Image (cartoon, helix red, strand yellow):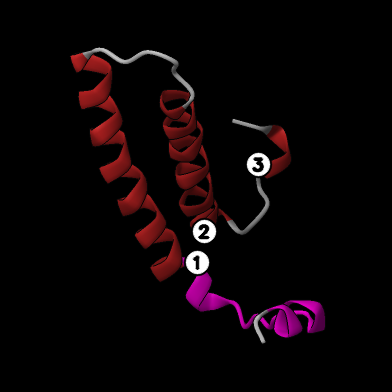
Amino acid sequence: MLPVFESLLPDDQNKDVLDPLFDLAVWHAYSKLQMHTDTTLAHFERMTQILGHSIQVFARQVCSLYDTQELPAEETACI
């Protein structure tokens, strides 16, 4: 994994950060393929499910622990 993300958060949350990052990198690699076979499409579909699950775990286990706010520029962009 990318060293910049190692130990970014406490150990109990770090795995929940690294897993979606890895899954997203694999999903992105499949999405960039210029030509797919039945096998790569099957793997891509499965990877999409895995990515969705790891993002749900991240949102449930990590995001809920942090109180975040939008920046003023982000707030005005939504208006």
Residue 45, image x and y in percent? 25, 34
Numbered tag placed on residue 6 in the rendering: 3
2, 38: nearer the viewer: 38
Foreground residue among 16 and 21: 21
Q: Position of residue 72 (x, y in %)?
A: 80, 84
Residue at 55%, 52% in the rendered image? 14
Tag 2 near tag 1, CB within 8 Å: yes
In the rendered image, residue 73, in percent from the top left (x then y), is placed at 80, 78
Quadrant of the image occupied by residue 31:
top left
* 72 in magenta: yes
Mark 2 or mark 1: which is in front?
Answer: 1
Question: Secondary structure under badge 1?
Answer: loop
State the separation of the CA atoms marked 3 and 1. 15 Å
Q: What's the residue type where badge 2 is placed? A: Gln
Give above or below for 18 relative to 16.
above
Q: Which residue is mark 1?
A: 62
**What secondary structure is found at the residue carrying circle 3?**
loop
